[in-house]
Image (cartoon, rainbow, N blue to C red):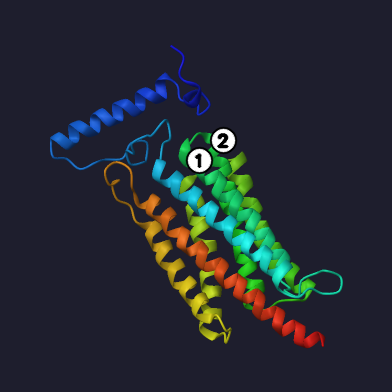
Amino acid sequence: MQEPLYLRWKQWDCQSDCEYECMMTREEERKRNGERPTKYFGKWPLKHVYGIQEPVSVAFSALDLAMQFQGWVSYFILVYYKLPLQPNRKTYYEYNGLVHIYAIIVMNSLFWSSICHSRGVELTVRLDYSSATVLAGFSLILAILRSFSIQDQSVKIMVTAPILAVVGTHILYLNFYNLDEGLHWKVMFGIVGIELVVWGLWAALTSHPSKWKLRAFFISSVLTLCLRMLDFPPYKGYVDAHALWRGAGIPLSYLWWSFVCDDAVFRTTVNLKKSK
């Protein structure tokens, strides 16, 4: 028999379907015997919805993507239509280009995250891991440049080059040598940990008018990272720690873009006064 189209494009075949059905049958037996759920192929048994492996994680990733897009559009309208522009039509906000690049990278990462959670085959996992690594690396670059108000091009290169080297090496390793999930998350936690230290130091020392948002973002990011480290059986077969981590990213995205907009207003005001 030929599987429906919505299953075939996800590479669901008889073997993968059998693995899933047998896993669910075995879990029902364990539940009747009063046993706790166990992991299969290194993952908790999650119930599928129309062939989607992790429906809650997919939904939260999609909502986060929508939140990021909404934040980016709000920022775009603010800097180009509400705040004053230079005579050459450029913004007074010196980090404008970095913010636009960040928006594209984070939305790309969330897109592939949704695809990977929908069906975790080798290709989608590689794309998810690679895009997440690029996002982590660029977020660290953005954190350093903004926190230390780096404007000199030579210093920017000195900061950016080693981070890009680490990110590029890690992506090449995952795609052409060994798709190691454990190593990937160690690298990710390392990069994100350094980024949070940078944001945390700036949040503690800055006199930015929206410093409370920066501090709230820092604290929320730390709590969200801790949530990612949790590991427990899925509630009702749908919600696990990873899904909750994805869900926690939605209000975090709103808080981030709210701070970016405030920062754009603040730096535009400062730079406008300097130009007069």
Q: In which quarter of the image is the C terminus?
A: bottom right
Q: Quadrant of residue 229?
A: bottom left
Mark 1: which secondary structure? Answer: helix
Q: Position of residue 241 (x, y in %)?
A: 35, 52
Q: Tell me the residue at 63%/58% (across/down).
A: 103
Residue 39's quadrant in the figure?
A: top left
Query: Which residue position is annotated with label 1?
Result: 116
Residue 123's tag is: 2
State the separation of the CA atoms marked 2 and 1: 9 Å
Q: Would you say 208 lies left or right of 238 here?
A: right
Q: Could one spot residue 183 in this view of the protein? A: no
Which disc, if any, is residue 227? none
Q: Position of residue 101 (x, y in %)?
A: 68, 59
User: Mark 1 belongs to which amino acid?
Assistant: Cys
* Neighbour tally class for label 2: few under 14, some 14-19, many 20 plus, Cα within 10 Å: few
* Vertical position of residue 266 compared to residue 237: above or below: below
Residue 25 is left or right of residue 103, and the answer is left
Above or below for 164 versus 152 = above
- Quadrant of the image for the N terminus? top left
Tell me which numbered mark, 2 or 1, is placed earlier along the sequence. Answer: 1
